[in-house]
Amino acid sequence: MKQQEIRLFAPYVEGERLPKEQIEAMTFEECVAKALEIGLKRFDRKTLAKQCRIHYPHFSEYMSGARKLDHHRLFLFCMFSGCEYPRQWLELAEEKARAEYKRQSAQVVGEYVQQAFAQRAAA
């Protein structure tokens, strides 16, 4: 006897976002946990894992951080859970890294210019 599969989809919703200060106060794992809470209101764990292309026995490992979520799975997880907290956290981390790189780059260029002027003054 063959069973028929009935596909049920929750309607697309724009992902929930938090203010920048609240996201900065949380870790990435906390963001994923909050997104999972919201996602479980829309789908059960097995369906959410299937939609995110995660083998169900490993779903808890992905959610706890034991396995790393790649970009594609993270995108699917955020889309189906209706929560942008993990992606928002990554965006903030990227902004911080970019600002730090600019600061270090400006510092190195400034030191180089000072050395060049010092060498000219000495000559």
Image (spheres, grey):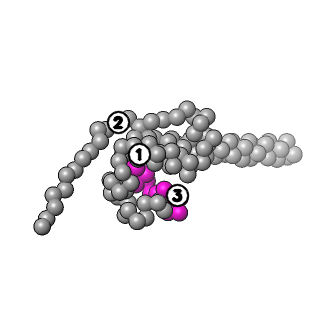
Q: Nearer the viewer, residue 9 or 95?
A: 9
- Give the residue at x 85% y 42%: 121
Q: Nearer the viewer, residue 15 or 121?
A: 15
Secondary structure under badge 2? loop
Quarter of the rendering containing residue 9:
top left
Q: Is residue 121 left or right of residue 20?
A: right
Reply above or below: 62 against 114: below
Question: How far apart are the alpha carbons under marks 3 and 1?
Answer: 15 Å
Residue 13 - label: 2
Residue that label 1 marks:
39
> What number of labels is visible?
3
Upstream in sequence: badge 2 or badge 1: 2
Question: How far apart are the alpha carbons under marks 3 and 2?
Answer: 25 Å
Q: Is residue 51 left or right of residue 27?
A: left
* Magenta-colored span: 63-79
What secondary structure is the magenta-colored segment mainly? helix
Upstream in sequence: badge 3 or badge 2: 2
Residue that label 3 marks:
64
